[in-house]
Amino acid sequence: MLLLFSVICTSHAFAQSKPAYELYNAKGKKIRYTRMLKKIQNADMVFFGELHNNPISHWLELELAMDLHNNQSIQLGAEMLEADNQEGLDAYMNGNIDKEALKDEVRLWPNYDTDYAPIVDWAKENNIQFTATNIPRRYANMVYKNDFQVLDTLTTQEKSWIAPLPIPYDKDLDTYQEILNMMGDHGSPLLVKAQAIKDATMAYFILETKKPNHLFLHYNGAFHSKKHEGIVWYIHQYKEGMNVKTITTVEQKDVSKLEDGNKHLADFIIVVPETMTKTY
């Protein structure tokens, strides 16, 4: 009877508190944010897998950067910025152009102002290096239409904005097979290859720009680092021995317990209510 009363009280308290998120380790054990922070501080790089329209992801991305910066040297990078726009991004970070000019010089996502500008501006104010890691979208689209070999037709300048060719490739990675299954009749091996060239390019520029004794915090869609695959797989292909930690974001109807299907997606899993407001 006492146990039942305790369960009822706990459930009632949880319902009243309405947490915006809960944090779990890979096995599904609830942990504190400060505990996660301590566990990732010695990593070479941390991949923050976001849901692009989830405000909790974006808020925690900035909070995590600020908290890490308080204790160590960090640098940032993001899928949302493409390698051929690095010069424009650097010009903004160095104060040579303003926000309006940035919009002319750099291809920014539609939700940049609300979701990514706060991080970029904070990095600018604190002199933190920010790397545009992703392949220019047009080249990924070329792979989707014509396979990897189309990249051989690019100029030397264009090739400088992608991972060195040929890239390693394993179509049997769980997440790549998951893409095919999700897309059904619309899926194709070329779709997976387009994903792979993005992952390879992001990994390449992370390693190319990473400074010694700096933690590299990278922002990307959750799928790009899910199950330590995607970008993380390429990191290990290009350079052995990297200490990599991953964070991902999922949505659940009930955030009080991590669903079995969401376990082991990353080292740390942020669970957000399905009813959370979307940024777009």
Image (cartoon, grey):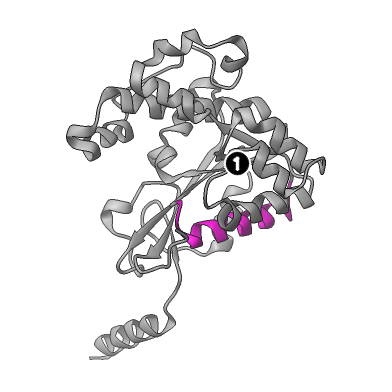
Q: Residue 240 vs residue 126: left or right?
A: left
Q: Residue 18 vs residue 207: left or right?
A: left
Using the image as rendered, state which of residue 24 and residue 222 is in the foreground: 222
* Quadrant holding the N terminus: bottom left
Residue 46 seen in the figure: yes
Q: Which residues are magenta?
A: 52-72
Residue 210 seen in the figure: no
Percent coordinates x, y for residue 122 in the rendering: 72, 54
Q: Residue 32 vs residue 125: left or right?
A: left
The residue sitting at the left extreme is 185
Residue lying at 28% horizontally and 25% vertically, measured from the top left: 172
* Quadrant holding the C terminus: bottom left
Percent coordinates x, y for residue 254 in the rendering: 31, 69
Residue lying at 31% horizontally and 23% vertically, measured from the top left: 190
Q: Residue 256 vs residue 39: left or right?
A: left
Q: Which residue position holds label 1?
A: 43
> Considering the numbered disc 1 on the image, is that residue within a helix, a strand or a loop?
loop
Residue lying at 39% horizontally and 30% vertically, measured from the top left: 195
| Crowding at mark 1 (Cα within 10 Å: few <14, some 14-19, many 20+) | some
Percent coordinates x, y for residue 72 in the rendering: 73, 48
Q: Is residue 153 magenta?
A: no
Magenta stretch, main secondary structure, is helix
Residue lying at 33% horizontally and 51% vertically, measured from the top left: 263
Q: Quadrant of residue 78?
A: top right
Amino acid, disc 1: Ala
- How many badges with numbers are in the image? 1
Using the image as rendered, state which of residue 30 and residue 274 is in the foreground: 274
Q: Is residue 113 above or below residue 210?
A: below
Percent coordinates x, y for residue 105 in the rendering: 67, 36
Q: Quadrant of residue 93?
A: top right
